[in-house]
Structures are given as structure tokens and as C-alpha cells.
Image: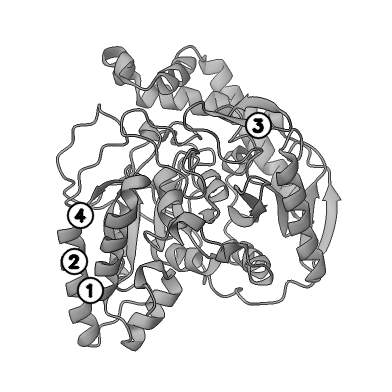
Amino acid sequence: MTDLARLGIAELGDLIAKGEASPVEVMQSTLARIDRLDGGLNAFLSIYPDQALAAAAKAEKELANGQSRGPLHGVPLGIKDLFEVEGMTRTCGSNLIQEPPAEKDATSVARLKDAGAIVVGLLNLNEFAYGPTGINIHKGSARNPWDRSKTCGGSSAGAGCAVAAELVPGAMGTDTGGSIRIPASVCGVVGLKQTFGLASRHGIYPLCDSFDHGGPLTRTVRDAALMLQAFAGEDLHDFTTRGARTDNYSARLGQSIKGLKVGVPTSFFFDDVHADTVAAVRAAIQVFSDLGADVQEVDVPFGQDAVDSWNTMAMAEAFVVHEDHMATNKYDLAPDVSSRLELGRNISARDYLASREHQTRVKQEMQAFMADYDVLAMPTSPIPAISIETGTANLNGREVDGAPIMGRLTRMAVFTGQPAISVPCGFTNEGLPIGLQLMGHWFDEAALLGAADAYEQATSWHTMVPPEIN
């Protein structure tokens, strides 16, 4: 008999719609699997079985009465412990947050619930989502299902872990500099950062208002499209969503990509990258050629300069958010978080504004550059998962600190605001997952998802399951 907990969103939605599985059965299977496996993974910081089972019973009754909410109806999800979820207690991965249970849902969570999804619990993360490693000294780090001595990447570590370990079929994470795509890459799942302004951040604890996104981690591209369909769109509580252009995000799935114009950067995105990662991504790009895409090497006119401006803006804005914590509880923060926040203290208004002006120029230049390409293809992370104990990884024969490196290739899409997705594309010689990153056009997630789906359907990487949990 199929273990319902191990199925993806589309598969579960189909079974539930046909009456071949009930939401209560699915939830019972999910909770049992979490209970059995998460003690060794630490993906969840809190689980709410009574709430989840009650919501499943409600969904079952609605479906019995012919009131289908769509393909997410009765499907369990995990939510990063940065979102407000009604009845659940948010910690942001820190000991400094002492909030009562939330009285309402973050907008994206509310929309997922309106589509019938059921929240199981809140997922692990870097403290206050400030870091790409997934290491959390306060709550314990989520352990990578492929190698439990390694991290799950950050900051949405628990989301990557829970989806890879098949504890839930999908999860909501956040991405300010790569925090959805990095965990997706190092855990071997799909992670989508949609266009800035396409989806509301209301009810998500802020880090950097200029860059914060909330988005899905799933096992397949199709599942990511289904989640995005539910939560995308304007929200009066988030001014950045004004004029958000929504679409049918499943419309391009399963279609040919013959003639798709794929740009492959010749510099920066492949500089100082793990050799196994380069080989896997190059092989993935060849798949696009084999499928009929027009693949061209391109010279992207910016790289580290844009990342440097991202750093300036992100550090300044994060310090403003956490200025009170730094004044009163600095030594109760994780050392890596407090030191990163400290860097933002002395950033001048002049430097901040110069970086914002640079962002505007880079976005304009990227829009002109992208006129010749449908997607850009590159690695998601320069290195695979790092050691929980040391925070390091081996990069082509030398031991490197993961924190300053892991987000180097994901920050560009946040800086420009364009959509980007990470999909599994192979493994290192040590058996650690590798992600292929695709960047697309603003508000054209349908085309980006279509390209990612075509690659996914031509390969089998998304079907791989960590041996210990298989």
C-alpha cells in the first residue's frame, strides 16, 4: 500500500479529489511519519497535530458535500517559523521572541488555507532568517536527510529538510538572498523565488524590506506551480504587490521547449564553484540543448558589484529591524547573527542610497539584457551542504567557511527582483545534492516553471530519495 505521506502535492490532490484517499488518512500518515523520523532531523520546531487533524476532518466533510477547494484541498504543508499561523506560536528560531499564539494568518498562509491546504507545524531556520547555512545554536540545526552531519542550507533549513525527507509534500520558506533556493539545492528539492511584488509578505517577520519574499519548496515543479497559484496576487497589506500580474502557472508545464533561448553566463556564476557542481550543471544545460533549446554562452555585464550592493542594503535594513535586539540582547543572539547585524550599524545613508541607485541601474540593464533570452542557467550554490559542526565545506581541495559563500549566486535574482528557481540536477561524488538555478523574466513565472518542468521531466533527479529515509 502506498504511504500517503510520501506523495507529492499533485498526487495527493488527485487521490483526494477522486475519493481514493481522505484528508484525515493523509494527515494521520503525515503525522506518523513526522513522529517517526523528525527526531533525527529536527525539521520542525513545533507541530500541531490536534489542529491539523481538525482541519483535515473539516476538509473531508467539505469534500463529501461536493465543496472542493481545488488541488491543495486536504494537502499537508509545513510553514517556516517566520510566518504568522493562527493558533501557532512563532519563535523566528530565536530565544528573544516571546509571542502568544498568532491570532491570524500571514496573507500567504491564509490564501493557502483558503485553497484547502492544512498547516502541520512550523519549520526550523537560521535565527531570524539571517544566514544561508541553516545552523541554529538555539533550537538545534535541521540535519540534511542525505547526510545528517551536514546542514540543510539556510535560512529555510527546515523547509528543505521536511520536503526532502518526505515529511510534508510542500513547505513555505522565505528568500531574502537565496534562503529558499539554497536549501532546495543542498537538499535536492525544488525551490521557487517568484518575482518581487507578486506575493504578499504581510505576516512574515521582516528582515530586509527591499528583498524579502515568501515562496514554496516542493518535490516537483508542478507542485511549486500549484502552491504559487494559491498565494500569488495583490494584497492591500503589502504595497509592493500593487499591480501584481498573476497567471496560470501550470499553463506551460509539459510543453516543448524547442527554441527556448537559454543564456549561460561565462563568468561570475561559474567562478570558484565546486567542480562536481560545475559538471552537474553543465550536464543539465546539455539536456536543454538535447530538448531543442537554443543554448548560448553569454557575458552578463554585472556580478560581484551587484552582490556587494545587495550586501550594503541588506545589512543596513536588517540592522534597523533588529536595532532594539542589538541594544538590549546582543549577546543572546547567535554570534554569526549579531556579527552580521553589527556590520549594518555603521553603513552611511550615502552608501545605502548609492546601493539603491545601483540596484535600479542593474535592474534596468538586466531587463535589456534579458530581451534576448528566455532564461539564464547557472549553479544555485557554489558549494554543497556544509558541516554542522564546523560550518565548512571542501571547495576543490580547500576547506572554506560556508556562510560567506553559499548565497553568492542567489543574490542577483533578489537584487533585480526577477523570478528564479532551483531544481535538482545531480550529486557530488560524496552523494550530496546539487541544484540548477534558472532565472526568468519578471512576472513570467509560467515560462520559468515550464522550462524547469521540461528539464525535470527529462531527468530523474527529482525522484531520488535519501537512502536512510527511503
Question: Closer to the observer: label 1 or label 3?
Answer: 3
Viewer-side residue, 51 vs 205: 51
**Residue drawn at point x = 60 percent, y = 26 percent:** 355
Determine contact: label 1, label 2, CB under 8 Å: yes
Asked if labels 3 and 1 touch by Cβ distance under 8 angstroms, the answer is no
**Relative to 333, is 454 above or below?**
below
Say which residue label 1 marks: 24
Calculate the distance from the C-alpha at mark 2 to the C-alpha at mark 3: 44 Å
Which disc number belongs to residue 53?
2
Q: Distance between the residues labelled 1 and 2?
A: 6 Å
Residue 51 visible in image? yes
Judge left or right: residue 141 versus residue 257.
left
Residue 319 position in % (x across, y down): 41, 22
**Which image quadrant for residue 2?**
bottom left
Quadrant in which the N terminus is drawn: bottom left
In the rendered structure, which disc, 2 or 3, sits on the residue that comes first in sequence? Answer: 2
The number of callouts visible is 4
Kindly identify which residue carries mark 4: 48
**Closer to the N terminus: mark 3 or mark 4?**
4
For label 4, the SS is loop
Q: Is residue 450 left or right of residue 105?
A: right
Q: How far apart are marks 3 and 4 (CA)?
A: 39 Å
Of labels 1 and 2, earlier in sequence is 1
Disc 4 marks which amino acid?
Tyr
Q: Which of marks 2 and 4 is nearer the N terminus?
A: 4
Q: Earlier in the sequence, mark 1 or mark 3?
A: 1
Residue type, label 2? Leu
Residue 9: where, in percent of width, then height? 42, 70
Q: What element carries label 3?
A: strand
For the residue marked with disc 1, what is the amino acid? Val
